[in-house]
Amino acid sequence: MTITHASFVTLPVTDQDRALRFYTDVLGFEVVVDRQMPPGRWLQVAPKGAQTVFTLSGPDMGGFEPGSARGIMLVTTDVDADCARLTAAGTAVQGPDDVPWGRMASFTDPDGNGLMLLTEKEGF
């Protein structure tokens, strides 16, 4: 096998503009691609410098069910500060909690896609 990385993760959303505001304004992601393509808008965001991007897939793009993505882990250097920022922006957060591999929290985007934050334990 010669796979080198994951290109993108699909996040099904009902409203791409609302999702874009959440991922850029709240999570601090950057827009990678935003263009019209048949059959709809191709919109991708990512943390600065990330190799894998997130496709905010609207209703016309592939028939995905909004809110169906789960278990997407985002690594952060300060889960507590990021949880405070999410809470201040009106996002409900579960945690953070200590786990054997670090400190972790979970939340959902405006469409209900499940995301997690992790500050990794050193040496794990």
Image (tube, rainbow, N blue to C red):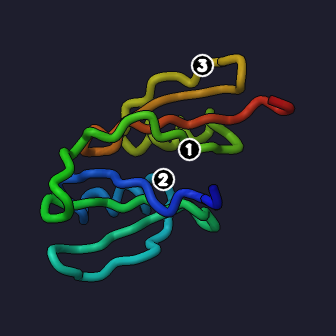
Residue pushed farthest right?
A: 123
Query: Relative to the observer, which residue lies in front, 59 or 110?
Result: 59
Q: CA distance from mark 1 to mark 2?
A: 10 Å
Task: Give me the residue at 72% from left, 34% from top.
Answer: 120
Q: Residue at x 71, y 26 (%)?
A: 102
Earlier in the chain: of badge 2 and badge 3, it is 2
Q: Nearer the viewer, mark 1 or mark 3?
A: 1
- Amino acid at the residue labelled 1: Leu
Residue holding disc 3:
97
From the top left corner, tell me how far across and down residue 86 is, in percent: 46, 41
Q: Which mark is residue 74?
A: 1
Q: Secondary structure at mark 1?
A: strand
Residue 59, x across and y down, in percent: 14, 59
Mark 3 crowdedness (10 Å alpha carbons): few <14, some 14-19, many ≥20: few
Pointer 1 or 3: first along the chain: 1
Considering depth in this image, is 7 or 57 the residue closer to the camera?
Answer: 7
Q: Identity of the amino acid at label 3?
A: Asp
